[in-house]
Amino acid sequence: MNLISTMGPFLKNLTNKKIILASNSPRRQELLKGLEVEFEVRVNSVDETVPKDIQAEYVAAYLSKLKSESFADELVGNEILITSDTVVIASGHVLGKPNSEQEAFDMLKSLSGATHTVMTAVTFRDKTRQITLEDETIVTFRFLEEEEIWHYIHQYKPMDKAGAYGIQEWIGFMGVERIEGSYYNVMGFPLHLIYAQLKKW
């Protein structure tokens, strides 16, 4: 059991609830902690293969629900599970996590000087119900020189990130020209939606 943070004064409705975050992502853990939420980290292994007939804009919700459903028979009465997934969509195609440095380079090269979409889906589940929320952010990169892309890949190792980048890292500082929507959604957790849902649960 990995218990983190304490419950804030505006989430007293959750005093008798146990929040479970199904993510090993240090970014998501830190962001949820920032909402003054007490939670436990618990992760199940899930085959994240996406059916080929699912359109790009529905992939994040599909995977978030898939992760949630893996806990369906495990939750007890006072537990609330949070699962999520983030995808980068460019030219109608989902850019997942790169499998090699060359693939990371190719992804970032395709995002250079262009606009793409980041979609995150968050699923809340307890013993009686499941709710999935989605958020969308539009991100525009300036033109990235090839040497800049390779520097980022070699120094920051973005192999665990959708689209091969983290907006909170060097490439975001120097490369992101404009965003429309939630910055934290690009980091993988639309905090305003999560807080609002927890507050009314």
Image (spheres, helix red, strand yellow):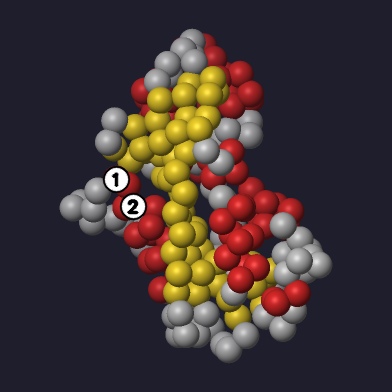
Looking at the image, the residue that sits furthest to the left is 53
Query: Where residue 106 appears, x then y in whole percent?
Result: 37, 24
Q: Which residue is labeled 1 in the image? A: 56
- Nearer the observer, 174 or 179: 179
Query: Which labelled disc corresponds to residue 75?
Result: none
Distance from Cα at disc 1 to Cα at disc 2? 5 Å
Amino acid type, mark 2: Val
Please, which residue is most extreme toward the bottom here? 77
Taking the spot 32% from the left edge, 47% from the top edge, the residue there is: 57
Taking the image as shown, residue 194 lies to the left or right of residue 145, namely right
Element type where label 1 sits in the image = helix
In the image, residue 200 above or below residue 107: below
Q: Position of residue 102 (x, y in %)?
A: 40, 26
Q: Which mark is residue 59?
A: 2
Which amino acid type is shown beneath numbered disc 1? Ala
Which quarter of the rendering shows the C terminus?
bottom right
Q: Residue drawn at (38%, 66%), measured in percent from left and top?
A: 66
Residue 115 visible from this viewpoint: yes
Q: Quadrant of the N terminus?
A: bottom right
Please, what secondary structure does the residue beneath circle 2 have?
helix
Vertical relation: 20 (above or below) 96: below
Q: Are marks 1 and 2 in contact (CB under 8 Å)?
A: yes
